[in-house]
Image (cartoon, coloured by chain):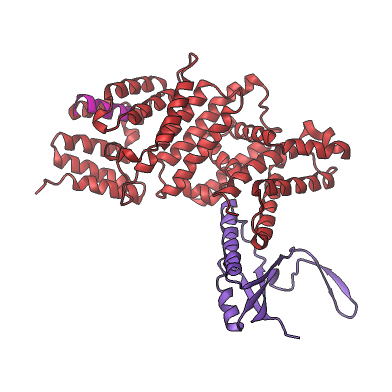
Amino acid sequence: MQLDEHLFRREAGRMVATLTRIFGVQNLALAEDVVQDAFCRALEVWKYRGAPENPSAWLMATAKNRALDILRRERTALTFAPELTRWLESEWTLRPTVDEFFAPNAIKDDQLRMMFSCCHPRLPEEAQVALVLHILCGFSVDEIAGAFVSNHAAIEKRITRSKKILAGSKRLFEIADAADFAARLPAVHRALYLLFNEGYHGASAESAVRVELCQEAMRLAALLFDHPLAAIPATYALSAMMCLHAARSPARLDASGNLSALADQDRSRWDAKLIAEGQRLLDLSASGAELTEYHVEAAIAAVHACAARVEETDWKHIASLYDTLMRLRPSPVVALNRAIAIAQLEGPQRGLEEIRAIANLERLSSYPFYFAALGELELRSGHRETARKHFRAAMKQARNSMERKFLEQRTDACEVPS
Amino acid sequence: MSEFVFLYRNELTGAPPASPEQMQQTMQKWMAWMKEMGEKGQLKNAGHPLDRTGKVVKGKQKTVIDGPFTESKDIVGGYSLVEAKDIAQAVEISLGCPIFESGGMVEVRPVMKM
């Protein structure tokens, strides 16, 4: 019996979500202990016997039995989910109630409940993302620190503090309340967007880690469609954006494992299935009156995906989409991308003008691809010396060896061919 | 061929618990190792894991003490029954055990022939 890759991680999130629903959010730590126990048991037993037919069901059943033990034993000492108290108190209703919460559909809802709870307004965005990764995706503190290129102590502090706030919030987010649901949904979108972006553009040098972050963001986003209140155009647009970006990831590294710029990628390596799925979701997102930044980012990715060769890219369309994005969510990085599109359309000099006109330009001073864009446009204008200076500046800001190597190659490209 | 018991011993450390991902990886290594021994006909019986709790009964007074067994630095976490030509080959088989990565040990003991 071959186990699915990351089975434990995925099951950890599902089990913690369900157990917290039953134990109450104040007993989050207890839920985590039960999950750890279930894994320890699996580790011991499967070692000798091999994995069971249905490993997920085995883990769930183990967690459920342990939960029943605790509910019986600690009935008087602990308070569990307040709204369930009367069902958990009597032997007549205890088992059926717990069974109900471990049914597949209930588990899905529990994950949504947890996802919305993690996006608590009292938590800063980066803490929400870390909490989602930790609780719902089963990432340890070290694994999160690795993915975010941060140190263990900083992430541990962030997670401990966030868990305290979550555990102190009295109860999990109630997903049945349509008004509350709609009010919290944008924060959930944002957290999943940031999680995906950390994977796609993040600083970690390990592409495997980054692919995992993207996959987790996509998995959680897909959970949203299954809930009628979350299946709204913005959700489809967010998922479309993720699919269309993820479709390009197989081509982001060339044959020798080096970063490859969008223009140089072997487009035959783009994932056609993901592009088709992204297009389908983008079509689904095109209803209603609301235009979100996810719609625009997905549309930009779709224009790129449509071009079989870089020369066929509809830069005019892309530049106008960046205009729209600047209105919806202005930022120096968006402005930089807009300038690059304009350079494609009207020449490198126009691109450089646009870059110089970016508001809050100083916020890009540690962003390696700001200097790289300057270098690229100067190189295209024939200013090799200036271009080289920019690429060197970019190299100083490189966040990992892959970026450094990529920028080194661009610096070499500034040499006059002999 | 002779029979040997592998006793898997682990120290009880205060190290932080492994992440789900690490646990899955450890388990897959064990499963692969057991499978390999099985395919080579070396595994007479995979054996069993042992619970980390229990009792120790000792002395003329038959005193009953609760586990975990604080007196011994390491405890037996499980056992397997292995077939090998001689102790040298049994030891060689044990070298593939993933327990060494987590600082554990394998005690290789020949089963006495009656």
Whether residue A276 is visible, yes or no, is: yes
Residue A292 at what x, y percent from top left?
45, 21
Residue B47 position by quadrant:
bottom right
**Looking at the image, residue A272 lies above or below residue A326:** below
Whether residue B102 is visible, yes or no, is: no
Identify which residue is drawn at 76% across, 49% down: A66
- Depth check, front residue: A364 or A144: A144
Tell me where the magenta segment starts and ends, as one range. A335-347
Left or right, A330 with respect to A213, comes to: left
Residue A291 at what x, y percent from top left?
45, 18
Left or right, B40 with respect to A340, comes to: right
**Looking at the image, residue B93 lies above or below residue A335:** below
Q: Residue furthest bottom?
A: B114
Q: How many marks?
A: 0
Q: Residue furthest left?
A: A418
Residue A91 at what x, y percent from top left?
88, 40
Q: Chain B hue?
A: purple
Identify which residue is drawn at 36% across, 38% down: A270
Residue B100 position by quadrant:
bottom right
Identify which residue is drawn at 57% across, 25% down: A185
- Depth check, front residue: B67 or A321: A321
Which corner quadrant holds the N terminus of chain A? bottom right
The secondary structure making up most of the magenta span is helix
Residue A380 belongs to magenta span: no
Residue B93 at what x, y percent from top left?
57, 75
- Depth check, front residue: A224 or A53: A53
Q: Which chain is red?
A: A
Q: Residue furthest top?
A: A289
